[in-house]
Image (cartoon, grey):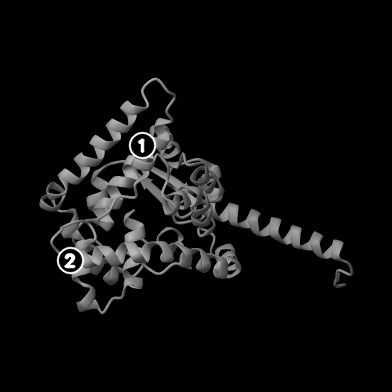
Amino acid sequence: MPVIIPTSWREILLYLALATGAIFACTAVYNILFHPLHTFPGPKSHAISRIPYTYHWIRGDLVRHVAVLHREYGDVVRLAPGELSFGDPQAWNDIMGGGSKDLKKWAGIFGVPKFMPTHVQNTTDKSRHRMLRKAMRPGFSDASLRAQEHVVSSHIDEFIQKLREKRGTIVNMEVWYRFIVFDIIGDLVFGESFGCAKGSEFHPWIREICETAAVMSYLMAINMYPILSDVLNFLIDSLAKSGFAAQKKILEPILERRIKYGMDRLDLVAPLIAKMDEWKWTIDDLIPHAIVMV
């Protein structure tokens, strides 16, 4: 039997395209007819590929899209070839409750971004996540939040006063909402406000967060595709690390001042500061957790 060997780039690309198409077709048939989840209801397009899921993730309307699917298909919907969504609240207790199998976190979501140090949100290590969550719990307790009520109130008062000063002018409330939210969370995490409302402009670090939010959405979407994710992370590793180093340069002096305050103030970062000696943490270890809180 003769063997056809491609002799030009055009032929090579043609064979690659045919091979890719064949692989996609075979995968689609498997996902629809033979995959362990093939009996669950949901759109065929979602069963064939994760692309529709990724599309809505990037658009930012995934939650609304899932709600529509639940209204159409019921309490259980197949969102992607290997993913189900449960609309019944009891599912949380059945799947994640005590006594259930210890489910491994999916790196497609929780391992993002790979170039950043691990923190409570992106670590896929269950024991580390449990340790961090336990340590951070006091900062989110009812007593701790009540103790910070005056902090929140003072920022809201300043926010309202600033809006009164702008009476009769056009105000972008979406921007001002961000001002007050970041000022409050900055005070609760770092012990000092970012001063957005006071200066009527974003703090440099907050501006960077707002500008990179969409980029992070794309990175998380790409991370759902392992091979593509590995290639991308390799390509942007040095660039991303330099970006993180710039954030670190801004946050280091802020956190150093917060550490000097000690434990007199029971804010969100206080429980982690209390553990720094025990865990032999430096300020570099604390920064990623402070970032994710904000």
> Which element carries disc 2, helix, strand or loop?
loop
| Crowding at mark 2 (Cα within 10 Å: few <14, some 14-19, many 20+) | few
Residue closer to the observer: 52 or 170: 170
Between 167 and 3, which is closer to the camera in this rendering? 167
Please indicate whether residue 123 sits to the left or right of residue 127 in the image.
Answer: right
Q: Secondary structure at mark 1?
A: helix
Work out whether residue 288 or residue 26 is closer to the camera in this orientation and state it. 288
Residue sitting farthest toward the top: 168
Locate the N terminus and report the quarter of the image it occupies: bottom right
Residue 34, percent from left and from top:
51, 55
Give the residue at x 29% y 35%. Answer: 159
In the depicted structure, whether residue 160 falls above or below residue 128: above
Tell me which amino acid carries mark 2: Gly
Quarter of the figure with residue 189: bottom left
Q: Position of residue 32 (x, y in %)?
A: 53, 49
Q: Amino acid at mark 1?
A: Tyr
Q: Is residue 120 visible?
A: no
For the point 43% across and 58% down, which residue is it?
109
x, y percent for residue 52: 54, 45
For label 1, count other residues whose C-alpha is less than 10 Å away and answer few (under 14), some (14-19) or many (20+). few
Q: Please tell me the numbered disc located at residue 177.
A: 1
Question: Residue at 89% across / 70% down in the picture?
Answer: 7
